[in-house]
Amino acid sequence: MNANVYQHFRVDEHPFIDLIGDWLEQVQSQYAPYLTDFLDPRQAYILETLIRQDSDLQFTFYGGYESAERKRCLIYPDYYQPTDEDFEVTLLEINYPKKFVTLSHGKVLGTLLASGVKREFFGDIISDGERWQVFLDKGVASFIGIQVDKMGKVSVRLEEKSYTEILIPKDGWSEEHETVSSLRLDSVISTVYNISRQRSKQLIESGKVKINWTENTRPDFVLDLLDIISVRGFGRIQIQGLEGKTKKDKFRLLLGVLRK
C-alpha cells in the first residue's frame, strides 16, 4: 500500500489497510475474485476508498438484503460477473417458544459468539419484534445449526430460510442533524442523548459503549465517517455525514440514530 494512504485513517485501522493491500494484490496476481468476511460500515468505507484510488478492480457489497449494515465484499477483475451465490451468505431463523420468552439482539449475538465462531462470520441480526433471523457465512451455518440449541435458558432451533422469507426489520434509523463541539466520543454521545458530558464519560469508562461492535473505554476517542456507536440502554448512533463546520468552529453532523 502507498504510504500516504495511512494518514487518512486512524492508527488502529492500519493493520486492516495492510490486509486490504493483500486482497487487492491477490486478485490482481491470480486474476480471480476474492470474497471478504462480513465488514462493518466503517471497514466497507475504507475498502471502497482504497479500491477506487489504488486499482482498477471492480467490487460489490452484499449482506443478504437491501439495507444490510454488515456486508461481505467481492473484489474481482473486470471480466467477472458476480451473482448472489458468490457471496456465500446463509439466512437462519431462530425458532423459540415466543409465548414465554423474548430474545434480544445482545442475547442472540452473545450466544452465537459463545459457540466459538468469530464476529466477522456473522452479518446482521434482524427482528420484526417477534421473529429473529441472522445472516452468516455459508461455511459456518451448519456448524452453528448443530452447536446452538439454547439461548440463555431457552431451547432454540436454527432453521435455514430462503431469501423470500427475510423479515422486514422493525427498528428503523431516524435521520438527525446535530452540531457538536468536537468529534470526541463523549461529546457526540452527550449531545445526541442529551446527557451531561460527565454522565457520557461514565458510560464509556464503565464499558457500556461499543464502536463498530468493539468495546471502547476512551472518552477522547475521535469518531469518523460511518462509525457505529452502541450505547447500552440508550441505543445506537451512526456518523452518516460530516457536513463541515459552523462559524463558531463546531462540527455539523448527519447522524442515523436508534433510540431505545
Image (cartoon, helix red, strand yellow):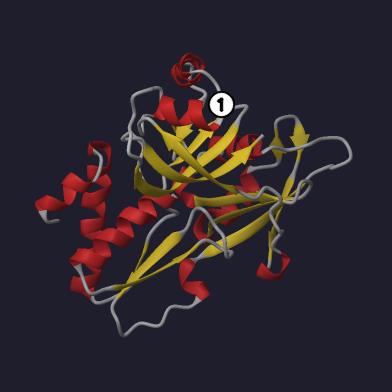
Residue 92 in picture, x, y percent from top left:
66, 56
Instruction: Return the residue at label 1.
Output: 194
Q: Residue at x 62, y 35 (%)?
A: 106
Left or right: 23 in relation to 91: left
Residue 69 in picture, x, y percent from top left:
52, 53
Vertical comparison of 171 with 236: above or below: below
Vertical comparison of 47 with 210: above or below: below
Q: Residue furthest bottom?
A: 79
Q: 172 or 106: which is nearer to us?
A: 172
Residue 237 in picture, x, y percent from top left:
52, 39
Q: Residue at x 27, y 37 (%)?
A: 12
Vertical comparison of 86 with 218: above or below: below
Residue 53 in picture, x, y percent from top left:
21, 65
Q: Residue at x 35, y 82 (%)?
A: 80
In which quadrant of the rendered image does the N terminus lie? bottom left
Q: 89 or 188: which is nearer to us?
A: 188
Label 1 crowd bin: few (<14), some (14–19), many (20+), radius 10 Å:
few
Left or right: 95 in relation to 259: right
Give the amino acid type for the residue marked by disc 1 in the picture.
Answer: Asn
Left or right: 130 in relation to 111: right
Q: Residue furthest right?
A: 99
Q: Residue at x 73, y 65 (%)?
A: 165
